[in-house]
Image (spheres, helix red, strand yellow):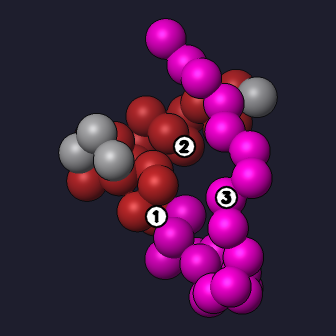
Amino acid sequence: MLRIWDSVETWEKKMGSNGYFTFLEGHLGAKIPRDEELKYAVLTS
């Protein structure tokens, strides 16, 4: 978990508040079929 948190902090510093998700989309987005939809989400404070 700490490694994920460090990664989130790093990408937010580099690319702004949505930086981590932009990073993930760039690396994982191509592997997820376009017809898939988001089925789960996690609420954070």
Q: Secondary structure at mark 1?
A: helix
Residue 13 locus on image (x, y percent): 28, 41
Mark 1, residue position: 23
As measured in the structure, the alpha-carbon distance from the residue carrying label 1 to the one carrying label 2 is 10 Å
Q: Which residues are magenta?
A: 24-45
Q: Amino acid at mark 1?
A: Phe
As measured in the structure, the alpha-carbon distance from the residue carrying label 1 to the one carrying label 3 is 17 Å
The crowding category of the residue bearing disc 2, from other C-alpha atoms within 10 Å (few below 14, some 14 to 19, many at least 20), is some
Q: Secondary structure at mark 3?
A: loop
> Mark on residue 38?
3
Q: Earlier in the sequence, mark 1 or mark 3?
A: 1
- Toward the top, the furthest residue is 45
Nearer to the camera, 32 or 19: 32
Circles 1 and 2, Cβ within 8 Å, touching? The answer is: yes
**Above or below: residue 21 compared with residue 9:** below
Q: Amino acid at mark 2?
A: Ser
